[in-house]
Amino acid sequence: MTYYGGKEFSDAFRTVRRNTIQIAQDIPDDKYDFRPAPDTMSVAEELAHVAASTLWQVQAHAVDRKTHISFDDFGAYMSANVAKEKALTTKKDILDALMKNGEEFAKFLEALTEEQLAERVSFPPPIQPSTKSRFEMLLGAKEHEMHHRAKLMVVERLLGIVPHLTRARQQFQPAATAQK
């Protein structure tokens, strides 16, 4: 069996967050109000959402040590997150929050033991499955960020920006071909 504990989890999350921060840096300030379609989040709203998205996870799993999350709990966590998102209005504020909140979440993940990651968290009906491991719930934070980052990479293309991961691959390809 392959071991994937707190250290590996935090390393993987730091990589995801580093890539999100690079996108946030690559998009010019004057494009932070860009919306790819009328009913979508702007670049700033998308990035602020990502910057605040791990806060509820730290509150629920580290501070409150929840083993059951009710609809009221989830609503309270989401309300607090929305308020924190709305406070992030400038590129600098967003970048600072991405760095600070990301590192706080990574340090939390890094400290988790195998036993803590295996703990079960339950949910009220009709939520199915009715329980998840703490690991699965926390993995959802990384998956959530990757979903939003993918959207931002499409936005970069719409703005005429080649995403940094594509630029890196394009720079690597000629060298790899030349070595063959």
Image: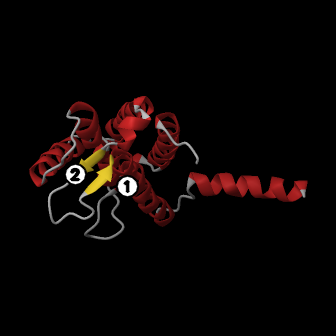
Q: Using the image as rendered, state which of residue 63 and residue 106 is in the foreground.
A: 63
Q: Position of residue 1 (x, y in %)?
A: 58, 48
Q: Residue at x 41, y 29 (%)?
A: 111
Q: Amino acid at mark 1?
A: His
Q: Secondary structure at mark 2?
A: strand
Pick whichever of labels 2 and 1 is earlier in the sequence: 2
Vertical arrangement, residue 176 with respect to residue 126, above or below: above
Q: Amino acid at mark 2?
A: Ser
Front tag of 2 and 1: 2
Is any atom of residue 157 visible in this view? yes
Q: Position of residue 69 (x, y in %)?
A: 18, 48
Q: Is residue 106 left or right of residue 52?
A: right
Q: Using the image as rendered, state which of residue 6 and residue 34 is in the foreground.
A: 6
Q: Is residue 167 left or right of residue 59?
A: right
Q: How many marks?
A: 2
Q: Residue at x 49, y 46 (%)?
A: 16
Residue 144's disc number: 1
- Which residue, given by chain and number where applicable, does mark 2 sit on? 122
* Quadrant of the drawing holding the C terminus: bottom right
Q: Residues within 10 Å of mark 2 (few under 14, many from 20)?
A: some
Q: Residues within 10 Å of mark 1 (few under 14, many from 20)?
A: some
Name the outermost residue toward the left: 72
Q: Using the image as rendered, state which of residue 106 and residue 62 is in the foreground.
A: 62
Image color mode:
secondary structure
